[in-house]
């Protein structure tokens, strides 16, 4: 099997039309540009960076009609560094998604490695930049981004309402609770309004560590399309060990290493304004650390995208973070956490 995977990848990339006829689609994104960080104790840093606005990726997806309104589906998706040619997600082949499932009148059930309902809500409802340039999850990082060994049920929309629920097995022998995760979301989407409430609960225990407590994330998000502009809102409550992990745990601005909060709130306010081929995005994210460390932070960001076509665009962004009381949050993008409190990006993104 290992010997056939590279051949399958080459066949898929070279013969997309033929595969599409058999129910399999090849898709992906190649995103590459330049990032410049300032403000870190190590000094300025300029890099040619892959996947700043959207992580560079490729994948295969397909669906088979089984009759009677029932279909089988699959998705395998892997990230890669376009500037280096290497795989991301721990150098895995398909580290972004590997799922198989069934779809019918009851909804959709999928199993494998997949995004959690909480992370989907953050990306699809709350953050107009989808955690790309000036990413929100530098300050709103949840414990549940993707879940291995998971089963996800997603309902069909009914009068604008829909919901989903996920179970991810910890797979620790003798302790079914250790490493286990539960989550879900419920929302309403009709016309210009989209509102969703998401929850994620992950047990921190392992084979060795016990009674560590759970990480709990709650996220309320909404967006509303006014026509000339679209407004976005998100409010997060994160409690427990690993409920708000640091994307960058280094003391990037000197002094002691920052502390990951175990009790915090976060707020996101954003707006997008399209005009012609251009789109302007304004974003504000605030982190309120409610522990004794009180390591708060604020991020202001401005992004601009220019569509060269439906699949290709140019983008640029600037983000600045203000840290308090020893916090060391860094301005980053989809691929990198960043090294300073200011980051400028400019890049080209192509979807296929």
Image: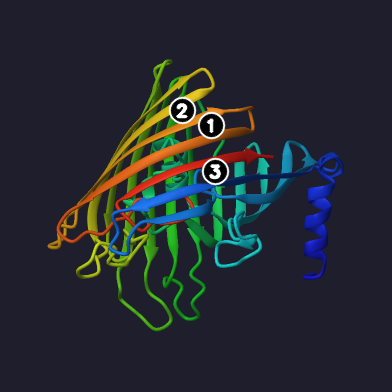
Q: Position of residue 73 (x, y in %)?
A: 71, 47
Residue 34 pos. (x, y %)? 50, 48
Q: Residue at x 58, y 56 (%)?
A: 96
N-term mark: 2 or 3:
3
Please identify the quadrant where the N terminus is shown.
bottom right
Quarter of the figure with the C terminus: top right
- Residue 189's label in the rendered image is 2
Q: How many tags in the picture?
A: 3
Q: Picture coordinates of residue 318 (x, y %)? A: 37, 40
Which of the two discs, 1 and 2, sits closer to the camera? 2
Instruction: State the residue lying farthest toward the left.
Output: 292
Expressed as whole percent of the image width and height from the top left, the position of residue 44 reads 35, 56
Residue extending furthest toward the bottom: 208
Quadrant of residue 63 within the rendered picture: top right
- Image depth: mark 2 or mark 3 in front: 2
Distance from Cα at disc 2 to Cα at disc 3:
15 Å
The residue indicated by pointer 1 is 157
């Amino acid at each position: 099997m290992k010997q056939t995977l590279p051949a399958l990848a080459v066949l898929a990339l070279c013969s997309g039309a033929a595969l599409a006829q058999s129910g399999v689609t090849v898709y992906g994104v190649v995103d590459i540009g330049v990032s410049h960080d300032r403000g870190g104790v190590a000094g300025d840093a300029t890099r040619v960076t892959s996947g700043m606005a959207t992580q560079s990726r490729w994948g295969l997806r397909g669906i088979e009609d089984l009759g009677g309104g029932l279909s089988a589906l699959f998705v395998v998706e892997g990230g890669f560094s376009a500037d280096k040619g290497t795989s991301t997600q721990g150098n895995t082949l398909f580290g972004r998604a590997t799922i198989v499932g069934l779809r019918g009148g009851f909804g959709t059930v999928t199993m494998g490695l997949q995004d959690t309902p909480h992370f989907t809500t953050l990306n699809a409802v709350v953050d107009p930049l989808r955690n790309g340039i000036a990413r929100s999850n530098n300050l709103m990082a949840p414990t549940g981004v993707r879940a291995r060994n998971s089963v996800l049920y997603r309902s069909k929309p009914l009068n604008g309402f829909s919901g989903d629920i996920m179970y991810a097995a910890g797979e620790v022998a003798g302790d079914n609770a250790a490493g286990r995760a539960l989550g879900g979301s419920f929302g309403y989407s009709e016309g210009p309004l989209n509102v969703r409430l998401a929850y994620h609960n992950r047990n921190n225990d392992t084979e060795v560590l016990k009674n560590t407590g759970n990480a709990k994330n709650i996220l309320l998000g909404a967006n509303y399309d006014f026509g000339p502009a679209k407004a976005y809102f998100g409010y997060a409550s994160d409690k427990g060990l690993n409920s708000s992990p640091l994307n960058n745990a280094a003391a990037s601005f000197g002094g002691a290493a920052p502390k990951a909060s175990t009790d915090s709130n976060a707020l996101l306010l954003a707006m997008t304004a399209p005009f012609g081929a251009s789109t302007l995005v304004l974003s504000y994210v605030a982190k309120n650390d409610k522990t004794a460390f009180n390591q708060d932070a604020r991020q202001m960001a401005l992004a601009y995208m220019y569509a060269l076509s439906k699949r290709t665009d140019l983008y640029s962004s600037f983000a600045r973070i203000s840290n308090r009381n020893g916090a060391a949050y860094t301005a980053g993008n989809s691929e990198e956490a960043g090294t300073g409190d200011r980051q400028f990006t400019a890049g080209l993104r192509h979807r296929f």
